[in-house]
Image (cartoon, grey):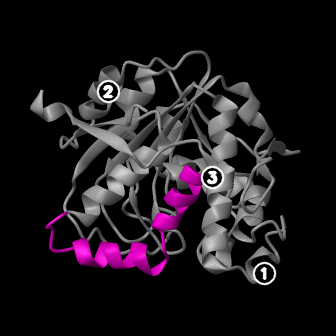
Amino acid sequence: MEKSKVYFTSDTNRDALVKLYDKLGKELKGNVAVKLHTGERGNQNFLRPEFVKPLVDKVNGTVVECNTAYGHDMGGHRFNTMEHEQVLKEHGWSENFDVEILDAAGPDMVLEVPNGLRIQENYVGKDLNKYNSMLVLSHFKGHPMGGFGGALKQLSIGVASTAGKCWIHSVGQSRDMKDCWEKPVEQDQFLEAMADAAESVHDYFKDNIVYVNVLKNLSVDCDCCHVAEDPCMKDIGVMISTDPVAIDQACVDMVFNSKDPGRDHFVERVESRNGRHTIEAAEKLGFGSRDYELINIDEE
């Protein structure tokens, strides 16, 4: 069986994104959704609009987001559409791109996960059905709950509606933001629920989806944190693939094999949350492989 191809460059300038996309040779057609993390108010590490603009323009994409599942008490300002749109303006997204909050209006679209390890349905914004293709443009970094955030987290928590986020976090116990955080959940079950949700979005777009992971601003905290640690490692590079499991595995491997002084701090965040289990669960579901071929385009 041929290994999944993951293309890499150590160039972290914005033009590298287009260079990698051209190298991959897969054209996203039709109405293209660009799912990325636009950053919580107060966060300093998220990828800026000017950095991703050449690639978003290349695919003629619409930046899409979904409302969050944490309120003001947890530092959230994107859990309702009105406040979310204000943060999008503050961070420069609205002035640079067409932007859509997929779950701005209900009812949610339900994606089935018939072979899910923990959940059998995933709730996403109904306006996902406007799009023929998706570019998943992830800022690879640590995460206080998942250990790390990359393509799989962007596919799952990132694309889920507020109700869908609650459903994943509570492992199918609640779709209500008022009580989903109170449900007792085992960590590995949460990670497996993320893998389930990721599979449903990956399968929805079939062959019309591409993944980019950007390894820069490598903080142990997510872009959803309004108070986040500054990056602990130097920038590493950018990767692209059609396999979300392979690209996340490749990023984790590159961080774990790094000799950067901040490597141990980042690894501790991943290991303390058993973060790699999300990749293992996704491979078990069969929509990607941890066995990959890393192609360094800098050497060509």
- Label 3 is placed on what type of residue? Ser
- How many angstroms separate mark 3 from mark 1 (CA)? 19 Å
- Under tag 2, what secondary structure? helix
| Picture coordinates of residue 257, whole percent (x, y) | 21, 63
Q: Which residue is mark 3?
A: 156
Q: Which residues are magenta?
A: 258-284
Horizontally, residue 22 falls left or right of residue 196, namely left
- Marks 2,1: beta carbons within 8 A: no
Q: CA distance from mark 2 to mark 1?
A: 43 Å
Is 98 on the left or on the right of 174, as rendered?
Answer: left
Image position, residue 265 (x, y; %): 29, 78
Residue that mark 2 sits on: 18
164, above or below 171, in the image: above
Q: Quadrant of residue 180?
A: bottom right
Figure check: 79 above or below 205: below
Is residue 270 highlighted in magenta?
Answer: yes
* Residue linked to disc 1: 183
